[in-house]
Image: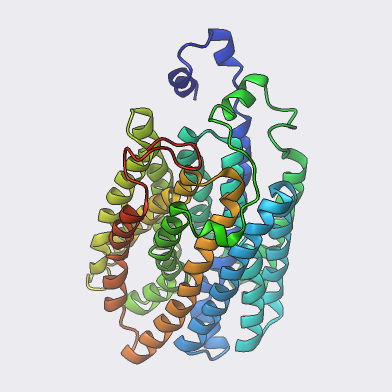
Amino acid sequence: MTNQLMGDHASMPAKALKTVGRYRWTVVGLLFFATTINYMDRQVIGLLKPTLMSDLHWSESDFGDIVAAFALFYAFGYVGVGRLMDKIGVKTGLPLAVAAWSFFGIIHAFMGSVFSFKVARAGLGLSEGGNFPASIKTVTEWFPAKERALATGIFNAGSNVGAVVAPILVPLILLTWGWRACFLITGLIGFAWVVAWYLLYEKPEKNRHLSAEERAYIESDPVQPQVHVPWITLLKYRGTWANIAGTCFSAPVWWFYLNWVPGFLHQQYGLDLMAAMLPLIIIYCMADVGSIAGGWISSTLIKKGVKTLRARKIAFLICGLCVVPVFMAASVSNMWIAILLIGVAAAAHQGYSANVYTIVTDTMPRSTVGSVVGIGGFCAYIIGMFVSMGVGRLLDATGGNYHLLFLIVSSLYLVGLVVMHFILPKTGSGVTPAGIEV
């Protein structure tokens, strides 16, 4: 960290360099753990898919429709709660969202029918939609542009840690107390995070833990006026449409991994939940590395003098190319080769995703970040609802054949890059509304 700050502030006195501070990384740590809990709570149902389908007599279409209910209300939560974060701020808004989704996670334990699970998933989706808009807004407030992709990659890595913790925790709870306890115990964890947030978080301008030097470093970007921008006006910005495109071509794929990879391993290789634990841990540990690496790539390029949006596009291209081999995942006979292919694709997704979020902070006024991320998420997860319904019906119709699904997801990231390339401002066209030179 000291070397990084020396690179950014080569002209500062040695004493000042030592006192710049690192509290902003504590804030990222809080966001990381919120994202970990977010993904752990949402992944429980995917891990329990074979058990729930057997005990409650669900079809693939039933499961797909339950996932679709989450996607639909997650979409509305993303856009609605994103706007709410811009209005009430993340200090109050994020812990409210965490408490709400923890409550809805718990009530899954008391459900039995397909309809009741849809209700529980709807509540979980509506409240979980607040995590990413709030987290991106927090990063915007706490980091200068050159560090935002890395900070986003770090907190976004929590999604993979949650996806690693869940396959360890859920099978143990399932074997000891049954599937209902899996929802109950994992749901309770979020309330501990709420307490930690209230104890540790305050806005940068009011935070007593910040040194004057660190506050100045955080505020080193050109100051942008904080103005209210109506939603309809946001649709006039290139940054809004770039975020919509990037999210729509990537987020539904990630949901496919979360909700159907455990079932794929069960069907393709006969793995029960305990046997699938290690493969799933490997996949999401790889994804964790990818999340941080994707942010590191573009942040490093920017520090070396590459224009900000060009650096993001290079990161998109690298990640998109790494996804392509996953089309072979359902064709290989060796399970560990399939795990490697899915793990690389998951890592590339997370690196891609970190940069999709960050282009909002590159291209949009700070006061609109939560709203823009919310709009992008809304569009993506409306599409995700139909994708979830379609995946379930396709698997029912083909007897559980995953070949076509992996073929489709292997190409979507590069298509998304092409669309974003034509939307984003071109190099040399001036300065974005966020004050970033392109």
Colour scheme of the rendered structure: rainbow
Looking at the image, residue 218 lies above or below residue 411:
above
Q: Residue at x 31, y 65 (%)?
A: 412
The C terminus, quarter of image: top left
184 sits to left or right of 78: right
| Label total for image | 0
Q: Can you tell which quarter of the image residue 123 is in? A: bottom right
69 sits to left or right of 336: right
Q: How far across and down, in percent of the image, does residue 81 sit?
A: 65, 61
Looking at the image, residue 431 lies above or below residue 33:
above
Q: Residue at x 55, y 26 (%)?
A: 220
Q: Residue at x 61, y 33 (%)?
A: 24
Q: How far across and down, in percent of the image, does residue 122 sit?
A: 63, 76
142 sits to left or right of 244: right
Q: Residue 204, can we see it?
A: yes
Instruction: Pick the residue in front: 434 or 190.
Output: 434
Looking at the image, residue 303 lies above or below residue 380:
above
110 sits to left or right of 141: right
Q: Can you tell which quarter of the image residue 283 is in? A: bottom left
Q: How far across and down, in percent of the image, does residue 383 sit?
A: 45, 74
Instruction: Pick the residue in front: 74 or 188.
Output: 74
Q: How far across and down, in percent of the image, does residue 67 sit?
A: 52, 77
Q: Residue 25, can we see it?
A: no
Instruction: Pick the residue in front: 217 or 189.
Output: 217
